[in-house]
Amino acid sequence: MRPLIARVEEIFGPDGILAQQLPQFELREGQARMAAAVARTLEPDAASTTNLLAVEAGTGTGKTLAYLIPAALSGQKIIVSTNTINLQEQLLAKEIPFLIEHLVPTLSALCVKGRQNYLCLYRWHQLYAAPQSRLFAQGEELAAIADWLETTTTGDRAELDWLTDDSPLWHRITATTSQCLGSQCPESGNCFLNLLRKKAAKAQLLVVNHHLFFSDLALRRFGHAEVLPRYESVIFDEAHHLENVATRYFGASISHYQLADLAADVESLAESDLSGRDRRKTLQLARALTVQAEQFLAVFPKERGRFALAPFIESCREWETEKAALAEALLSLTEQAEFLLPVSEAWGGIMRRGEELSRTLETVTGDHDSRHVYWYERRDKTVALSASPIEVAAELREALYPEVKSAVFTSATLTTAGTFTYFATRLGLPDSTETLVVDTPFDYAGRTLLYVPPADFPEPNQPAFSTAAAKTLAELAKSSNGRALLLFTSISAMHKAAKALRAELPYPLLVQGEAPRPRLLERFTAETHSVLLAVASFWEGVDVPGESLSAVIIDKLPFEVPSDPVIMARIEKMKEEGANPFVEFQIPRAILMLRQGVGRLMRTATDRGLLAILDVRLFTKQYGRLFRQSLPPSPVTRNLADVQAFFAGK
């Protein structure tokens, strides 16, 4: 058989299958280079020692086909991991069917999701038969799921378009790893997860999200697995998210919600499984855990957010008493579950959950080690306590890289100021990792303009900034005739601007939080001259091609306020090691986020528009040069008249 790289080069060549079969195919030199690099990584020659590749592929380069085609032709069992459902759906609905039709007719591909997406038949039958099931669902909801179970072959909640994301009913009928009865389950023969595992074992390409991949990877360290079979190589798309996701799964966390959920499951099982003294005692222990979990929750301040755990423990007089009482309530319930094992294997699942929660409670609140940061997060009705690794590089070097033949990392934003140094350092990639930058084919120089305010504009930390920014936002939005996405670094700044702009702009003003994200984007796309104000998640994943999005305006450079305990711990560790966290950590993080934000403008080759960053530090601070080096090659102006002329077509 011809080498993989030769076959790939032919496919992406001027007379290849893509040129023959793809309508409006354009030969993209960057796409072909990326495909060849992926092929080399998946099938390294004798002279090659690397099996790791990082590729920054700008919007419009066709990166999905550039990695999917070598993956499909390699014959390896490969995981393709993405951060968003949208990209997963695109792969399964568009690119993979194309490959099967024109390139690899025998290719088998499957989307695998986390456990929480699949119904547990055992828990369903337990709930459906229990009188208290009416607490979690109306009769019509239970009937609808019963009817669905007559036809579904997957048990995937995505088939239930009427089910809300936060449905309490669904939570009662899906199973986490610790809730699963495994081979002892009476429904194991029909289990949707078991059927999924069998399908996954036969598929060549598995499409997953980062959360499932790292959940599975973390569990494998302890000899367990979620639903993923053994694989040979992995391709990470949207790879700039990996550090944050890996941090979550290589740590430990316990929440008031988990404790209350365990107690509720025990009550439900006791009602259906037990009688007499055993039932009374078990219900008493479950209710005691519920009460103790509520008391533990009440110990924490009401202020929402993330906070360091150690200072709180030192200042809380009731801490040791409440922690000991909670540990005792958990232990008592776990011992009772062990006692009830002869009654039903279901009590084994309860016992394992209790043991796991007890271990996690001790891990997070016991003796702290220097490799982790310990923190708590207060939400509306719950609190979660966590231990997170300060660095995931060592974890990845141990748990991932030695276990795969190849790993490919790709995203539109991996470099800062033209280098992969930050990305490689954070993920622990060795110096032998091959890197490649594939620039976007979009004509930023000819079709965009970058506006930065003049030198006398106040810096973001000056009192006059908010007023000046609101005035400039209004002028820019008027110049673009609406059609603008306004991105902010804080919710308070967004609301201040919204209040000022409502009186100034004659266009519909759409503000994040006033409607669900999908609805806001639908309106923004449909109402061509509307203005959308947003923070956080809207900095990436917004794909509005065409006239409706003709200006992306950013209020200031997106430096994080270093109050998050994990970020603070990483900064402190770098200081202790003699590094400069501002230059080596905070600036690169801000650059990557800024690049994601400005990337919302050009989504197709025919798009045209304005980029605006209302932060003069791009020119007044020495580090501004690093940000400017990381931006697209748009012509720069500091004159509003140039913006008006740009939109007037002059």
Image: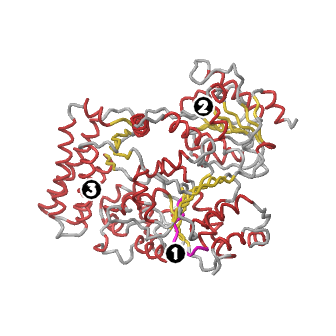
Label 2, label 1: how many angstroms apart (C-alpha)? 48 Å
Q: Nearer the viewer, mark 2 or mark 1?
A: 2
Label 3 SS = helix
Label 3, label 2: how many angstroms apart (C-alpha)? 47 Å
Label 2 SS = loop
In the rendered structure, which disc, 2 or 1, sits on the residue that comes first in sequence? 1
Q: Amino acid at mark 3?
A: Glu
* Residue 292 vertical placement versus 106 (above, below): above
Q: 10 Å neighbourhood of mark 2: few (<14), some, or many (≥20)?
A: some
Where is mark 1, residue-wise? Answer: 203
What residue range appears in magenta? 73-81
* Quarter the C terminus occupies: top right
Left or right of residue 44: residue 576: left
Where is mark 3, residue-wise? Answer: 356
* Residue 394 drawn at (x, y percent): 40, 52
| Residue 447 seen in the current view | yes
